[in-house]
Image: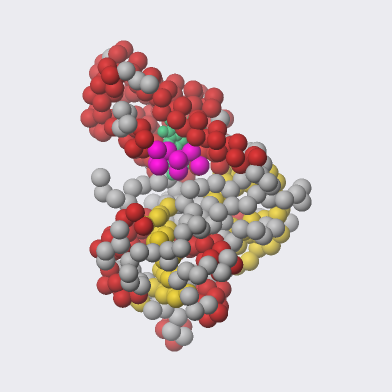
């Protein structure tokens, strides 16, 4: 454990980190990739370009520094990252590389302000933080490999079937090429998919939520074609999967991971609230609840642009008709004339407090699961809190580097 003086030195650098955190981490990535280009095979290049990964790592290092005398306070955040690292196959020896370039970046950015004492304190603190991650990841690696159907690293899967779920989203049914059993998973978990698109120097890895109930002989992922926006190009992997990976092709997957999962031991009612492609883990949760005949009331709320981009609508409508425990509500921001003619949605515009308070069952003691684009999640989280839902019942996950929904 760190001694009192080291803790004091670390805490005295927190204000400097607040100001220079992102400059330090972007410098860190630049020098690390120059010296270890092989790491470009595992980092998401799109996140790097948008600076999202820099922000995620900077926030985490800052949070750890802030709580260095009580790392238990950051353990839930560490757990989520440890799942991501395990899914990517991060190895203990890679922590040394990260540590070396992180300390060098602190020194380079802070200049003379980073005294030998400060650098030594950070080296010690990094060692403690890294060992918390390494220990947690070791446990996750062991439990994954020892699980029936589990495996180490990446395994080949064939695309057995591709099904278009909406204008933007296509499902891929993936079966192992070795025809051996596949690991069970918890609804809400994701896999990492690794591939090397034609013409690319490096492999690329992306996480996709599993979109069906566990216990099937396949894994299903449902991928949104990420078209270019003003501030970013087409999603390289999502577009490649849609356009260049036909049925019969082979991709590589790591075993399911993730700590955003349905509480299956709990008898609380369930509210599944999603925006856009955020509905994929919700479909897995819904299918699991139906398959397990859980005596729980389910409210399925989904926000989409319109009926054309709304995936799994027929599937969810059929389940809703068959099960009186399920109630379903759709909110479209830009409904088409056809959507209006066919009364496909319940609200036009954005999800807000007034609407949620009408459709969500009382008392407010369900478990509330939330996924979707960041602005949607911020609005939905705030609306749930305003109608009186206690934050400890709200479970959420970001696609992409994690951000905090609760203002700090
Ligand atoms: C993701 C923190 C060590 C590789 C992340 C994320 C955080 C983080 C906060 C974002 C998680 C999310 O997506 O929600 C840390 C900290 C570390 C550490 C605090 C050291 C104590 C490492 C090491 C490697 C690594 C040693 C491997 C060289 C990655 C990769 C991602 C990631 C590849 C996914 C990023 C992407 O694909 O854009 N890490 N990490 N990390 N980390 Fe780490």
**Front residue (pair 348, 152):** 152
Q: Farthest bottom residue?
A: 341
**Front residue (pair 4, 203):** 4
Residue 159 seen in render: no
**Front residue (pair 342, 8):** 8
> In the image, residue 404 lies at what x, y percent?
33, 47
Residue 69 against residue 390 in the figure, above or below: above
Residue 204 location, quadrant: top right
Q: Quadrant of the C terminus?
A: top left
Residue 213 against residue 28 in the figure, above or below: below
Q: Is residue 328 magenta?
A: no
Residue 318 against residue 172 in the figure, above or below: below
> In the image, residue 283 lies at what x, y percent?
53, 64
Residue in the picture at 38% in, 79% down: 346
Residue in the picture at 54% in, 24% down: 93
Q: Quadrant of the N terminus?
A: top left
> In the image, residue 179 lies at what x, y percent?
77, 51
Q: Which residues are magenta?
A: 75-83
Residue in the picture at 56% in, 63% down: 288
Residue in the picture at 73% in, 56% down: 248
Q: Main secondary structure of the magenta part?
A: helix
How many labels sit on residues? 0
> In the image, residue 75 lies at what x, y percent?
40, 38
């Amino acid at each position: 454990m760190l001694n009192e003086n080291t803790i004091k030195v670390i805490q005295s650098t927190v204000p400097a980190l607040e100001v220079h955190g992102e400059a330090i981490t972007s410098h860190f990535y630049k020098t690390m990739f120059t010296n270890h280009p092989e790491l470009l095979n595992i980092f998401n290049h799109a996140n790097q370009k948008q600076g999202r990964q820099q922000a995620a790592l900077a926030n985490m290092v800052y949070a750890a520094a802030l709580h260095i005398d009580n790392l238990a306070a950051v353990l839930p955040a560490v757990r989520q990252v440890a799942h991501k690292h395990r899914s990517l196959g991060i190895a203990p020896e890679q922590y040394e590389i990260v540590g070396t370039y992180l300390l060098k970046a602190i020194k380079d950015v802070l200049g003379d302000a980073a005294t030998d004492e400060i650098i030594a304190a950070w080296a010690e603190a990094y060692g403690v933080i890294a060992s918390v991650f390494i220990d947690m990841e070791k446990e996750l690696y062991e439990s994954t490999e020892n699980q029936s159907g589990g495996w180490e690293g990446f395994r080949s899967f064939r695309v057995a079937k591709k099904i278009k779920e909406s204008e933007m989203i296509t499902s891929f049914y993936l079966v192992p090429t070795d025809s051996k059993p596949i690991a069970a998973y918890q609804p809400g978990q994701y896999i990492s998919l690794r591939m090397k698109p034609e013409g690319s120097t490096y492999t690329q890895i992306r996480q996709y939520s599993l979109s069906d109930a566990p216990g099937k002989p396949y894994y299903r992922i449902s991928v949104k074609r990420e078209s270019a926006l003003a501030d970013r190009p087409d999603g390289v992997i999502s577009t490649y999967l849609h356009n260049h990976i036909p049925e019969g092709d082979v991709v590589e997957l790591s075993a399911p991971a993730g700590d955003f999962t349905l509480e299956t031991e709990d008898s609380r009612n369930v509210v599944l609230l999603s925006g856009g492609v955020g509905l994929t883990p919700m479909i897995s949760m819904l299918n699991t609840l139906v398959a397990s005949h859980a005596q729980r009331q389910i409210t399925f709320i989904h926000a989409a642009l319109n009926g054309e981009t709304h995936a799994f609508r027929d599937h969810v409508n059929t389940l809703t008709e068959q099960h009186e425990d399920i109630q379903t509500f759709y909110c479209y921001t830009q409904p088409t004339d056809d959507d209006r003619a066919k009364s496909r949605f319940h609200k036009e515009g954005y999800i807000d407090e007034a609407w949620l308070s009408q459709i969500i069952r009382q008392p407010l003691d369900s478990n509330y699961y939330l996924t979707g684009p960041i602005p949607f999640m911020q609005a939905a989280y705030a609306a749930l809190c305003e109608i009186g839902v206690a934050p400890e019942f709200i479970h959420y996950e970001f696609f992409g580097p994690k951000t905090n929904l609760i203002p700090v």
